[in-house]
Image (cartoon, grey):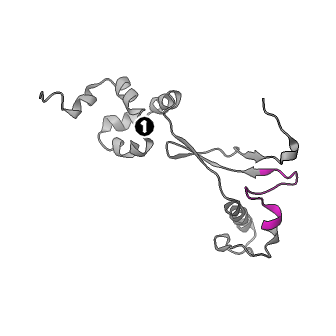
Amino acid sequence: EDDQDANPLLLLQLPDDALRSILIRTCARDHCALKQTCRRICEIMSSTEFRKERSEECFAEVSCKFPTAFEQYKSHKRDRATWDRNMPDPDELSLHDDDTEFMDDYSDFGYRNENDETVIHPTVYVDGKELRMDHFKVYILPREFHCEFL
């Protein structure tokens, strides 16, 4: 067997654009380990071109985390506790049958506003990194609205 065929360093002899085209196809969970292999791979994988090409070629891994209704409730309480020092610690909250605020204002999906719409603030991840989207909301409308989306 030819030693040159078994040499993994041949990959590093490729031009940057060809190496980037190979690296965009790797799983996001492997990116950290790959970046530690050598400076050149780290520079390519940290570049704007890498993220852009990975996205354009549909290799970017996107996931979304939707908070539970109780997580949203605790977050709302935490926000209120920042300006009202008399509020109990939201991280120590538990549900009781007499907790009318949660029972009245939250559905299985989250907070219901005055129009009976449920607004959820999901967290979006691209390749394992949180995507900052302060104005991204998901509205769940009551069935009686009979919405049609074109």
The quadrant of the picture occupied by the N terminus is top left
62 relative to 79, above or below = above
Image coords of residue 51 (percent x, y): 48, 33
Q: Quadrant of residue 26?
A: top left
Q: Which residues are magenta?
A: 102-118
The residue positioned 64% from the left and 52% from the top of the image is 66
The quadrant of the picture occupied by the C terminus is top right
- Secondary structure mostly seen in magenta is loop
Taking 22 as reference, is 122 left or right? Answer: right
- Magenta highlight on residue 114: yes
Q: Nearer the viewer, residue 62 or 107?
A: 107
Image coords of residue 81 (percent x, y): 72, 68
What amino acid type should be assigned to the residue bearing mark 1? Answer: Ser
Q: How many marks?
A: 1
How packed mark 1 is, by other alpha carbons closer than 10 Å (few <14, some 14-19, many 20 or more), is: few
Taking 137 as reference, is 35 left or right? Answer: left
Q: Nearer the viewer, residue 1 or 40?
A: 1
Image coords of residue 130 (percent x, y): 55, 47
Taking 102 as reference, is 75 left or right? Answer: left
The residue positioned 78% from the left and 61% from the top of the image is 106
The residue positioned 83% from the left and 46% from the top of the image is 143
Q: Which residue is mark 1?
A: 46
104 relative to 3, above or below = below
Determine the secondary structure under disc 1: loop
- Magenta highlight on residue 147: no
Image coords of residue 80 (percent x, y): 74, 65
